Each structure stands twice: as C-alpha cells, then as structure tokens.
Amino acid sequence: MKTNVLIGSLLLFSCLQASAQPSFPKSGEEDREGIMSEAYWKIWNRDVQEKIDRDIEKNRKADAVLSFADGRPGTEVRIEQVSHDFIFGAHIFNFDQLGTKERNDRYKSLYGTLFNSATIAFYWNAFEMQPGRLRFKGEYWDTEEYWNKVEEPKMQPHWRRPASDPVVEFCESRGIRLHGHTLVWGNRRWQYPNWIADELMTGEEKAKMAPLVKEYASKNNTLRADEFTEAYERLSPKKLAGMLPDFTKKIADVQRRRIVEIAEYYQGRIHSWDVVNESAKDYALGNLAEGEELCKSWYGLMPGEYDYKALKTAEEVFPESVALNINDYYRDGKGKAYADQVKGLLARGCRIDIMGSQMHQLGAKGSRSASEGAEIETPQIVWDRLGSFGETGVPIHMSEVTIASPGNGKRDWAIQAVLTRNMFRLWFSVEPVMGITWWNVVDDCGAAGESSTSGLFTRNMEPKTAYYALNELVNEEWKTRKTILLPESGIVRFRGFKGKYRVTWTDRFGQTQISEFYLKNDGDGFGN
C-alpha cells in the first residue's frame, strides 16, 4: 500500500516537472522586461555572481576517483548523482491538512524529490495541550478525512501542528532526514502551554504574583513579559526566585521532563533537534547569567540559564548520532550577540552541532523593496553575518527561510523566483552552510502575521514560478550527471557535487554492473 501511495505521489511530481516552466531572468542582462530594478542588478551584479559561482565550485564539489578492474576499455561509464549531501528542506506542518486528497498528495510528493529534509512541529502548546497528554500518536482530528471536512482549518488549535508519529512514519518511508522543532522556546503565543502558571504555582505564589501582573495576564496564566507591572521590573531574578521557590523548581523540572520524554520516545529516529530556539535576545539583554535559578526573560518567566541547561539535558538523553541545534533570528549588526552566545556555550562544555540562522526579511513587503534595490539581505550583508557565525566553528543551517511574492500577479511571481534563485545560490556557496530550509511551502498556510504569499505553491497546490526556479537548482544545476568512456587505465576521474552516486558500466564479460558510493571529500570513489 505504501508503495502505491509513493508511486502516485511521484506521478504527480512528474506532472509538475513536465508542465510548461515559466521563464524568469537570471541576470541583469536577461531582465529585458524589467522584472527587477536596475538598482537590484547593481547589487547582484556580474562580479557577485561570478564570486558565487567560484565559491560553489570550491565548497560544494569534490574530486572523485573510480577504478574499474573488470571494466572493458571504451565502454560507457554512466555517472548519476542520486542524492545531495547538502540539506534542502522544508517544514511539513501542513501534513494532510490542505483540504483535498489531490492537494495533500501533491504536497507529500515534494518530500524525497525537491526536499530531502522535513522540519516536524513539536511546539509545546499544541503538542501537550493538557499536562501529561503528549500528541505523539495520530487521532481522528489528525486524519485527512477530518481536515477535508473542516470549513475553517485556521481556527483549529492544531492547525499546522499535526501529531508527530504519522509525519515521522511518512518521512521514514521516503528516506527523508527528520528535524524536530522545537524543544525549548520562551514564546508565550506559539510555545508555552497556557496551563504552565496555573499548574506550577502554589496558591501562595499566585497571591504573591497577583500584584505584579496586569489583570488580563492573571486570567490567561500566560505570564508574558509585556504583561508585568513596574513593580515586577524592579525585582531581581534572585528576589523573584525567593518569592516563588516551588515555581522556580517546577519550571526547571518541567523543561527537563519535556526534553527527556521526547528523547526517550524517539531515541535516534529524528536526526536533529532545535533544542533551544530564539534565546539570543535574552543573552544580549544579560538575562542568561550563570548561576541564576530563575530567568526574567523578555518572554516572561523562564528557568535560569535555560539555554545552557536545555543543551546539557539534550546531550545527556539523546544518542550521539542526533545533532543538537541552537536556532535564532536575532540581529545586532553582524549577529555578534548570537555568535558570542554560541561561543560562550561551547566554552562551558555544551555540545552544539548546528547553528540555525533564520531569514524572514523577505516577506511580501521586503521582497518588493528588495526588487527595487533596497539593501535587504544583500550579498555583503549575508557574507558578513554568516562570516560572524562561521567564527564559532559550528556548521550553519539556514533553518527558516521566507521569500514571498509581493502579490499574486505574473510579475510578482517572477520577482519571487529571481529572489529565490539568487538567495539560494548565495547561501549554497558559503562554506559553513550545511543546509537551507524553506518555511511555508503553500500560500496562506503560515502562522498569523506571516506573509500569505510566501509559498512555492498556491493554496490550491499549483506551482508558482519560484518552485521551478528552486527545482532547477536542486535537481538540475546542482546534480552531477556524466557519461565517460572508460580509458585503458581503468581509472575515471571527475569533479561533482557532494552526495550519493550510482555508477553503471559494462564489465569485460558483457555484464551490466551497478555500484554506488558517496562523494564527500576529494579522492572519494570506489575500486573493484
């Protein structure tokens, strides 16, 4: 049954590839219709493009050596790259939620064809709506049948938050790399369950907190930082911890429990995790000082040193094969605070395998402005920021990427396609970058406040021009395919993009032979 579903999805994907691909300019010289302004092409000029080309050649390729002891000289050796070492991902938050089987199948067909990695939602407030009831296993309200009947899907509390097991099992059936997002995050709207304050504070502690929060905060138990009074602001973390001893202990315990429970359930099945999300602003504000039991986070009350403690807990309970990530969007100049935070955590003995860098600047308004020549995510800005992050020595994941079309017209779609091509080429060229993850695959399926035109597909799962731009890069320009005649020496050398390869040739007995190998470093290959 799974095979039939896979074949059906691949057929849908083949139809996408076979349909007429819209053209879009790839350089200023080709932009005869003026899709982008002259000011834009002055920024993304020929010198910049040539540097990107050189860096891609240097950083994303390696020299391979293949030895054919049983080969017949003069026979064709067909070399085909079948997968990338580099991560091209997307979140999979809309799994089975798009309203029809046709839309859902087309959505699923992208994973394993365009995307080799999927970010899976583990936002705490939707994953554990009631204390102790974790949404690992799918229920009726997670099924395609349920979502196909829902008239207003965005009004459902688990919209964009499918149960995790069905998604994990689907991705495993496709051989997709799995990434969990996110274990620890202070955000009260998208992460922290409303039951936290009510469950964790004693009656006496609630009475002490009452004068420190505004009236509406005490009703919804969110304890957001912007809901506290001036009296609260005057209290030190140490003083607050003394006032709230039970809450201080329990909030640290519940953070640890969450990490431990998920780690024990999935073991090493999920390949990487955003252990800590968007904590750099607290670092920059001095809220993550060593030794504090309670953190006066800009989000609200959090465990003291929550970034450090979360990473140490994750290192303790996850297998070594699982990559531990820290993830952020925070910008101060060239990203100095975030880089300094990572350096500090590493110096304290934390294991950080990947450093996530979000990019949501190119929403609908940002994309329009960029096309007109505004200095938003220019090559120099990206080189400077990623250069700062690279100083940590930790690989970088462009973990949440938004590139929207300014509107829904033909020119708007072309603008999105040009931005997509240039930004992906730039990120792909930077040596420490190990992957890029597109955030909202489908229009009008983002979180509240996110651009409704940031998808590669319309809400009806029709491909936009940016889809073709990205597919052309991932599955054409950046995949190596060669046919070489076997020389007398029996040795074939070539330079190709890093990843998994399949080699086909005819041996001296006239038998077709097939072998596979991974190309990651210069000199990789095989001999027989």
Image (cartoon, helix red, strand yellow):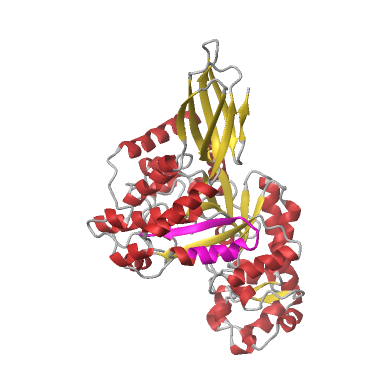
Per the image, is 149 magenta? no
Per the image, is 398 magenta? yes
| Residue range (magenta) | 382-404
352 and 267: which is toward the camera: 352
Task: Single out the residue that lies furthest toward the front.
Answer: 488
Can residue 129 be seen in this snapshot? no
Residue at the location (60% across, 89% down)? Answer: 230
Is 468 left, or right, of 139 in this rendering?
Answer: left
- The picture places residue 309, in percent across and down from the top left corner, at 72, 64
Residue at the location (35% across, 46% down)? Answer: 468
- The picture places residue 426, in percent across and down from the top left corner, at 46, 56
- The picture places residue 365, in percent across and down from the top left corner, at 35, 68
460 to 286, vertically: above or below: above
39 and 272: which is toward the camera: 39
Can residue 449 be seen in this snapshot? yes
- The picture places residue 154, in percent across and down from the top left corner, at 41, 59
The quadrant of the rendering that contains the C terminus is top right
Quarter-of-image position of residue 202: bottom right
Task: Single out the residue that lies furthest toward the top.
Answer: 509
